[in-house]
Image: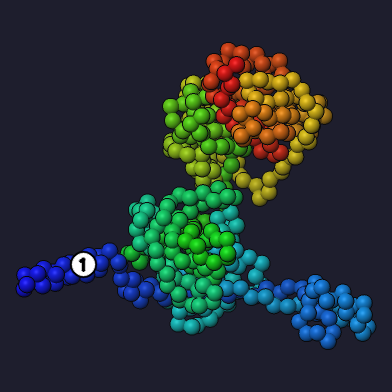
Amino acid sequence: MLKKIFALALFGLFAQSLAAKELPDFTTLVEKHGAEVVNVSTTQMTQTSQGIPGIPGLPDGDPLAELFRRFGPPIPHDHEMPREQETHSLGSGFIISSDGYILTNAHVVDAADKITVKLADQREFKAKVIGADRRTDVALLKIEATGLPKISQGDISALKVGEWVLAIGSPFGFDSSVTAGIVSAKGRSLQQENYVPFIQTDVAINPGNSGGPLYNMKGEVVGINSQIYSRSGGYMGLSFAIPIDVAMEVVNQLRATGKVTRGRIGVMIQEVTHELADSFGLHNTSGALISAVEKGGPADKAGIQPSDVILKYDGKAVVASKDLPRMVAGTAPGSKVAVQLWRKGATKEVSLTIAEMPSDGRSVRSSRNESSGEQIARLGIGVVELTDDQKKQLQIEGGLLIDEVRGANVRSELQRGDVILALGNTPIASIEQLNNVLKPIPKGHNVALLVRREDTASYIAIKLDDK
């Protein structure tokens, strides 16, 4: 009996020891680094209407407003003049230098007329924006203070999926709130966010946490909490942070010039799928497939063509298509870079000069011709040739308009109204040419169609019918 009790006691001690090892204690980290985190509040002046007399707070858009205008007492003319009203928002930030430089999200301070930073010791300072970069959602603020506690920068390359991380911020205005979780993934690409390889976590992040730091267990900042995935507006277990190395690259430019300069090469790219790799004779899906080349741009001048696959950029392997925009953007305009391509079954080396990314791009919409035409049986589509006016509007020299998608391809990515620009490496200008290019290709093989949809061109892999 005593042996049984002793064994149970030992098991209990072992379980407690195991739990202590598996569940970290964050108290020391918070006590040591909590003062590095700040609250960022903004004030913005907006124009608003004064509402309806006799009913305080009733906005002009309310259904009752029109009723009172028609049947209520006369409304003085000056009453409907708009007036200025203050709107407020809250976010978080953290100190990166003891002389008052603070990092936060660009969306936290966007369009703010007044920015106030409150430290952990409750002191408040007016802040000015040194610079903000919307593409990475990073903003640099400055307050007039010295001797401030600053963060230590973590090593993103050493950050591992599954390790514990901690966030400190002001969700819903509750200052210095602490939440913890693990790294769920690294290098996440989000829609419209091509320049940030996000850190995904399951740390509870809510409105007000934006701009706050993400700490590792060493007390080093590894990211800026920036976005959540939510259907309700609140935390759902998917949070995204900007890696600190990406943020600090932006900070260095903002401190030096107040803006961020990025490189561009003038191409549109897409992922290399297994089907596309097979159609181009590639042994794996590494690289970035070129779907369109800007006429007169750096890539065009270097001889890069649609259907080329960029395998290496400046000596670094392009593992996935999402890697290329970040590599190019991080290259100083005017630099000369060596690029390794895959073209028609062989590698090719070219050199190009990086251009500067403009603030805005130009898009061209294509018109859609609904007329029917000859059937290209093996592709499972119907096509018609483009008119001269359509080619001029699209600024292309050839192409075939898809006016029907049938058979197995109804479930493919092809759509009525798409324009076929090329099959593999061969530009397509006529139905006859497309038929001739298809003839020698064996049945059941994958072919890559370069398809333009509105202002975007991309390759789509299609398996030929067995006809």
Q: Quadrant of residue 40?
A: bottom right
Is residue 344 visible in the rendered structure shown here?
yes
The quarter of the picture where residue 208 lies is: bottom right
Q: Quadrant of the C terminus?
A: top right
User: Which residue sits at x=87%, y=74%?
Assistant: 66
Q: Quadrant of residue 428?
A: top right
Q: Residue furthest bottom?
A: 54
In the rendered view, tell whether residue 217 sits above or below residue 357.
below
Report the amino acid beneath label 1.
Ala
Q: Position of residue 402 (x, y in %)?
A: 71, 29
Figure disc tally: 1
**Left or right of residue 398: residue 270:** left
Instruction: Specify whether residue 301 is in view.
Output: no
Label 1 CA crowd tier, 10 Å (few <14, some 14–19, many 20+): few
Q: How is the image coloured?
A: rainbow
Q: In percent of the image, x 53 and y 21: which residue is there? A: 445
Rendered view: 164 above or below 116? above
* Front position in the image: 399 or 304: 399
Which quarter of the rendered picture does the N terminus lie within? bottom left
Q: Residue at x 22, y 70 (%)?
A: 16
Q: Is residue 276 left or right of residue 16?
A: right
Along the viewing direction, whichever of 420 and 110 lies nearer the viewer: 420
Q: From the viewer's perspective, is residue 409 above or below residue 44?
A: above
Q: Residue furthest left?
A: 2
User: What residue do we see at 75% from left, 36% from top?
Assistant: 366
Residue 451 in the image: state x and y as whole percent.
Answer: 65, 31
- Residue ID for mark 1: 15
Q: Position of residue 68 (x, y in %)?
A: 88, 79
Residue at the front extreme of this rendering: 1
SS at badge 1: helix
